[in-house]
């Protein structure tokens, strides 16, 4: 029966199609569960960091709080502003969400990457899809016909595009070292030698900063800076459409955590513990880091944000890339 | 319309040019050939100022301030504060109230520094009727006023950092403030609107053990101030956002009647506790910290330093605290002799003054409140002109206004 | 009726005031705010500049025949209050200093408001007085402290307290205007900080400030009719069903 899971290596048959669909469903379910409890954990952890209790009313220790929130969002009225561009307004959250979930298809959760694709250009695929989300954010901001949303959407587009470049550059170093764009091969290469966080420490730092910016999280949360832009691009969204934007955001936190774990922290590889647990630990470490930043940092200013990306991060990433190239060639 | 009475041209949050779809399908202007790919001609790309309503319902206007911002791109061309949403006509109400009855109304002016408001009114009336205040009462007043100053400054720092996107300092500040509020609650039974002072003294003496608790509070608070210094002052992102922003010089500040921290941030050593000494402040040693650059960072840092000085004053008051009554011999009905009286005190936000025109009756003929927030806010349009939209909140936050006071 | 708080000042550790005070001072008269009223001098900022005047006032106060305890303020006729006298003298001094720069007939009254020097000027010269006082050497009244109006039923009075941050003087400058079509020249050109206060007076008292750059209502909404701080103002909501837009008025 194990052969059924390894559908990548054989011709496609109907049972394989069934397994693919099943795999997608299971991944979706796992992702939603992870996101739900990421939100819960964020509130709880930041609450502790700020000397508060955090959610503790719904269910034991507030464990059901996120479900209550989702339920609330589901039953809320779906309001479309009268002067909004209706079709784009309705479409934007979907454009934003779908790619966020699709990126998870290439993440090797375990060595046998049961539910996901063993994809030759997995790294490129991830970067390409995650860029699509920008369109959803920008369209949502524009279609709302609200000035705050518009500014938020524009900032968001500018920011995500700017940080996409150093992010991509920082990943090239990893690709050079492993000689592959296949995420699973990259993990395998790391399990044979050393986690790439060690030789690629500069790249990892660039990645960490750029990833935080890509995720629109503190200190780079300008697109939704609530104290300046009220809520940024999703200010006019309510109910489930708003939930989609939220979901997108947290799926990306998860996906980016997965990418960090895969590329720099050795993915599922590690001693003693089973692969999936190693993977989960590494992903959660990344997510926790994001919480920690959020509880600590004020928000960076928009012009400083841009110059930081182009004048600081990008040169560092380039140098790292050149250095890595030289070293790998000579080796 | 009652909410936004200024007419349709100022409806908040809406593009004045109709729907986005309508904008999109704007017909190509005559005389310009469309671009080859069918898009709009270059001349059709409209460059126009954007009218942005910040407030009155906005998370960072600290109340119901509305800023009508005309922006070109992200650069502010002009910002016009629209106030009055919280106007309650305190000055008019006071004309029909006995002097003692006005005190609760002062609580609601700058509701973050009610004790100082209480004092400013009582002090003016006492000056007018030449009334002696018992020693213990005067000490208690200074004590609660300085504690109030700390509470108010704490809230400023917390709220300012929240404006700049850092959430934790806000919650920390509230925890520290909570301890002060609890102490106030024990001395006067209220947490926000204290109504604690009376003409001729204070309403309640300190309860058993209260002074000891204040004594414990001082070193604890000093430790907390160090924590704030470590947490905030050295943060590179914070510094980059507030340094060199919202700068004005002493000359401008004086011309605009700016007072309080905003004035001192320009390097002017001007504190009414020293420059027009009132109460018993001349008995205490304290410094008046001043800034150097007059920017938002100086204003932030001065708040921190002033809390330190307030703690020093509290320590000295506690050391000197005499026994005795807390309310002087006050006539049942206070009648102020005909005349005009003005007294200003150093409030948490600047010079808080009460101007009373009395006609010998038990109610003021006219009461004018010199509201520091109101005066300080006038400078805001000057500070914002030509700035980027992202600096708007940083500058507005540092001016430190309380809308209850601005609108009175 | 009372002693004042300056007495406590004297018992305190040395301050500039105690230094200029004769030892016989306890029990002296003077209201609690005497220090600020007589000299308006910062005890630290201008400790050297002001006490010349202050000390003369205070010595006269100390030797004054009427200790405060024996003279409750309500009893009439009270002997001349030395603080008031000092303030009047100071007002005279300022009036003389200003006279050379202003046309004849600018001054209507010289006196004291509580313990502050007061000049009441003709309204045409209102801004000119502020400009001259701002530029006057050894006065430099550069800081507008309090600026407001009062409705005295026969006339409206505009009151401004200006202070010198350098020398510590605080002076009250007043002017009067008739209630109908009330108008006063604006002092925004001298003190930009008067801007909103004048708008507030325009709003609540109906005083037209000529030359004001941006005179419109500030507290009430633009369509509002009436000036609430006038004494004859009647809240329309008490007399009729009112449309908050002011459309029916």
Image: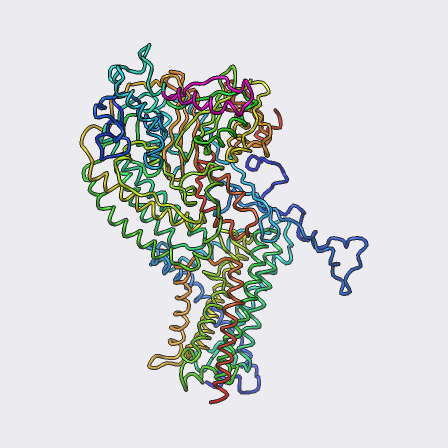
Q: Which of B45 and C211 lies nearest the eye of the viewer?
A: C211
Where residue A62 appears, as percent x and y from the top left, is: 36, 57
Asked if residue C233 can be seen in this view, the reply is no
The answer to if C113 sits in the magenta stretch is: yes
Q: Position of residue C197 (x, y in %)?
A: 50, 31
Q: Position of residue C86 (x, y in %)?
A: 36, 21
Residue at image location 62% in from the left, 36% down from the top: B7
Q: Tell me if residue C134 comes above or below residue C1 in the rendering.
A: below
Name the colouring of the figure.
Answer: rainbow
Residue segment shown in magenta:
C86-114
Q: Nearer the viewer, residue A36 or B263?
A: B263
Q: Is residue A178 left or right of residue A80?
A: left
Measured along the vertical axis of the image, is residue B69 above or below residue C244?
below
- Image height check: is C177 above or below B377? above
Horizontal side of residue A53 vs A299, given as left or right: left
The total number of labels drawn is 0
Residue at the top extreme, as displayed: C77
Instruction: Tell me if residue A16 is in the magenta stretch.
Output: no
Q: Name the spot of residue C244 as percent of width and height, x first.
A: 57, 30
């Amino acid at each position: 029966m194990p052969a059924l899971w390894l559908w990548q290596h054989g011709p496609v048959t109907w049972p394989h199609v069934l397994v693919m669909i099943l795999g997608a469903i299971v991944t979706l379910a796992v992702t939603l569960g992870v996101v739900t409890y990421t939100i819960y954990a964020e509130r709880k952890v930041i609450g502790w960091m700020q000397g508060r209790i955090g959610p503790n009313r719904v269910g034991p220790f507030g464990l059901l709080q996120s479900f209550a929130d989702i339920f609330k969002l589901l039953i809320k009225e779906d309001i479309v502003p009268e002067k909004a561009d209706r079709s784009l307004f309705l479409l934007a959250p979907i454009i934003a969400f779908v790619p966020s979930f699709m990126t998870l298809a290439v993440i090797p959760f375990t060595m046998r990457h049961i539910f996901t694709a063993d994809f030759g250009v997995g790294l490129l695929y991830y970067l390409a899809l995650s860029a699509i989300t920008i369109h959803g954010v920008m369209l949502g901001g524009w279609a709302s016909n609200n000035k705050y949303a518009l500014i938020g959407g524009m900032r968001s587009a500018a920011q995500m595009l700017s940080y996409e470049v150093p992010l991509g550059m920082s990943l090239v170093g990893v690709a050079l070292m492993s000689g592959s764009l296949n995420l699973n091969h990259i993990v395998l290469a790391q399990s044979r030698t050393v986690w790439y966080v060690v030789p690629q420490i500069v790249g990892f730092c660039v990645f960490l900063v750029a990833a935080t910016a890509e995720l629109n999280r503190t200190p780079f949360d300008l697109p939704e800076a609530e104290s300046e832009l009220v809520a940024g691009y999703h200010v006019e969204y309510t109910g489930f459409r708003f939930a989609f934007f939220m979901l997108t955001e947290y799926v990306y936190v998860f996906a980016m955590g997965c990418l960090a774990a895969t590329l720099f922290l050795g993915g599922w590889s590690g001693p003693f513990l089973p692969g999936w647990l190693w993977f989960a630990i590494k992903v959660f470490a990344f997510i926790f880091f994001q919480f920690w930043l959020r509880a600590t940092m004020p928000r960076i200013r928009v012009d400083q944000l841009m110059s930081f990306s182009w004048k600081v991060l990008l040169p560092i990433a380039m140098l790292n890339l050149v250095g890595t190239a030289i070293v790998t060639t000579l080796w | 319309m009652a909410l936004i009475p200024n007419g349709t041209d100022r409806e908040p949050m809406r593009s004045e040019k109709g729907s986005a779809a309508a904008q999109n399908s704007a017909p190509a202007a005559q005389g310009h050939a469309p671009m080859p790919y069918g898009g709009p001609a270059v001349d059709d790309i409209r460059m126009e100022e954007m009218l942005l309503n910040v407030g009155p319902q906005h998370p960072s206007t600290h109340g119901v301030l509305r800023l009508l911002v005309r922006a070109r791109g992200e650069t502010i061309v002009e910002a016009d504060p629209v106030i009055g949403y919280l106007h309650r006509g305190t000055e008019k109400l006071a004309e029909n109230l006995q002097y003692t009855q006005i005190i609760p109304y002062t609580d609601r002016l700058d509701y973050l520094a009610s004790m100082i408001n209480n004092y400013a009114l009582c002090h003016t009336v006492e000056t007018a009727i030449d009334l002696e205040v018992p020693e213990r009462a005067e000490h208690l007043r200074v004590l609660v006023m300085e504690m109030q100053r700390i509470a108010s400054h704490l809230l400023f720092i917390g709220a300012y950092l929240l404006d700049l996107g850092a959430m934790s300092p806000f919650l920390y500040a509230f925890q520290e403030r909570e301890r002060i509020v609890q102490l106030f609650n024990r001395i006067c039974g209220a947490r926000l609107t204290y109504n604690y002072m009376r003409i001729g003294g204070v309403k309640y003496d300190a309860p058993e053990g209260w002074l000891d608790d204040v004594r414990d509070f001082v070193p604890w608070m000093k430790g907390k101030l160090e924590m704030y210094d470590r947490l905030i002052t050295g943060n590179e992102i914070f510094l980059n956002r507030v340094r060199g922003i919202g700068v004005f010089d002493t000359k401008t500040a004086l011309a605009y009647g700016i007072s309080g921290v905003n004035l001192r941030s320009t390097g002017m050593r001007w504190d009414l506790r020293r420059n027009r000494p009132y109460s018993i402040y001349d008995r205490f040693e304290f410094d008046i910290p001043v800034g150097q650059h007059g920017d938002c960072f100086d204003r932030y840092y001065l708040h921190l330093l002033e809390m330190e000085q307030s703690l020093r004053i509290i320590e000295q008051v506690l050391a000197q605290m005499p026994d005795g009554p807390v309310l002087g011999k006050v006539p049942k009905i206070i009648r102020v002799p005909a005349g005009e009286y003005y007294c200003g005190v150093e409030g948490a936000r600047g010079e808080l003054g009460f101007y009373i025109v009395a006609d010998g009756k038990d109610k003021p003929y006219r009461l004018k409140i010199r509201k520091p927030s109101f005066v300080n806010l006038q400078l805001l349009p000057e500070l914002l002109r030509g700035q980027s939209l992202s600096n708007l909140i940083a500058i507005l936050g540092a001016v430190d206004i309380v809308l209850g006071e601005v609108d009175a | 009726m009372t002693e004042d708080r300056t007495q406590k000042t004297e018992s305190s550790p040395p301050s500039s005031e105690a230094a200029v005070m004769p030892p016989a001072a306890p029990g002296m008269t003077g209201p609690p705010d005497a220090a600020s009223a007589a000299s308006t001098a910062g005890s630290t900022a201008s400790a050297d500049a002001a006490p010349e005047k202050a000390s003369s006032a205070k010595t006269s106060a100390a030797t004054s025949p009427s200790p405060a305890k024996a003279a409750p303020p309500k009893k009439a006729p009270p002997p001349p209050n030395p603080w008031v006298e000092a303030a009047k003298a100071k007002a005279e001094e300022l009036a003389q200093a200003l006279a050379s720069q202003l046309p004849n007939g600018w001054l209507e009254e010289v006196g004291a408001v509580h313990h502050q020097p007061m000049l009441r000027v003709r309204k045409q010269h209102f801004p000119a007085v502020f400009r001259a006082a701002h530029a006057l050497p050894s006065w430099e009244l550069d800081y507008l402290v309090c600026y407001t109006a009062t409705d005295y039923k026969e006339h409206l009075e505009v009151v401004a307290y200006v202070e010198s941050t350098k020398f510590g003087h605080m002076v009250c400058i007043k002017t009067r205007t008739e209630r109908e079509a009330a108008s006063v020249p604006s002092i925004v050109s001298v003190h930009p900080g008067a801007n909103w206060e004048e708008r507030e007076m325009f709003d609540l008292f109906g005083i037209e400030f000529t030359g004001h750059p941006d005179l419109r209502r500030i507290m009430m909404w633009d369509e509002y009719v009436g000036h609430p701080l006038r004494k004859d103002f009647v809240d329309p909501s008490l007399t009729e069903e009112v449309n908050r837009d002011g459309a029916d008025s």
